[in-house]
Image (cartoon, rainbow, N blue to C red):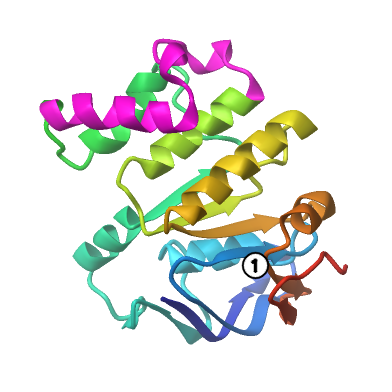
Amino acid sequence: MIFFNNVTKIYPAYLTKREKAVLDGVSFKIDKGEFVCIVGRSGAGKTTLFKILLGEEKMTSGSVFFDEKDINKISSREKCNLRRRIGTIFQDYKLLPTKTVYENIAYALEVTGTSDEDIERYVPEALDTVGLLEQALHFPHQLSGGEKQRTAIARALIHNPDVILADEPTGDLDPYNTRDVLDLLLTLNESGTTVILATHDKEVVNSLGKRVITIKDGKMVSDSKKGRFIL
């Protein structure tokens, strides 16, 4: 489903004071329905991998395929369609502070031209999935960290994506809410959604017992089917 083929990303010297290879010859394949942890210390290149897959960053060399399509060669329209198939969850939630939980999720549908009738049907379904129906009219500042992240997950789910990219989704959460978010990601994976979790949290990775791809200094140093955090 997803194939990174010898991907290198070099940031020029004017951005980083000296030329820096954030990714250096990285290759791996992720099949449909897998749950994969991309691990490494902060700055290892995990977020850059996600940005390249989403078409937000261009790689210096190599290629990335999504369902056998080279994302470097697809049109802008195809790239928009690709992004609808990928739901993204961030550590800092990226919620709109002046919109309610319901409105934050509905907005993701409004920008793609979804009808009001469909929005009224899909948003409650997403809220129910993450257990936030009672908080639908709350604003982000009224939510706990765990509730904010579940709102972000509901927003990521609203287009029924094939893949969820979770970029340090538990970084700001306490252990209880961390487990809650992980259980939700596992449930989504069990329903057939491919989940790719980027994290530097050793306890999170070791508790999951899933495939682990380890990135160190821009290089892939291991790929274990049921791995542990080894750095």
Q: Give amino acid for label 1.
A: Tyr
- Give me the residue at 76% from left, 70% from top: 227
Mark 1 burial class by Cα count in 10 Å: few <14, some 14-19, many 20+: few
| Residue where numbered disc 1 is placed | 14
The one nearer the camera, 189 or 174, is 189
Image-based side of 61 in relation to 87, left or right: right
The one nearer the camera, 155 or 179, is 179
- Give me the residue at 33% from left, 40% from top: 158
Identity of the residue furthest to the right in this view: 231
Tell me where residue 15 sits by quadrant: bottom right
- Give me the residue at 61% from left, 57% from top: 197
Residue 52, compared with residue 170, is above or below; it is: below
Query: Is residue 132 rendered magenta in the image?
Result: yes
Query: Is residue 142 rendered magenta in the image?
Result: yes
Tell me where residue 45 sits by quadrant: bottom right
- Residue 115 in picture, x, y percent from top left: 11, 32
Q: How many marks?
A: 1
Residue 91 makes an appearance in the image: no
Image-based side of 76 in relation to 3, left or right: left
Residue at disc 1, secondary structure: helix
> For the stretch drawn in magenta, what is the main secondary structure?
helix
- Residue 134 in picture, x, y percent from top left: 44, 12
Tell me where residue 105 sits by quadrant: top left
Quadrant, the N terminus: bottom left
Residue 132, compared with residue 203, is above or below; it is: above
- Range of magenta residues: 117-145
Residue 109 makes an appearance in the image: yes
Quadrant, the C terminus: bottom right
Residue 143, compared with residue 123, is above or below; it is: above
- Residue 11 in picture, x, y percent from top left: 62, 72
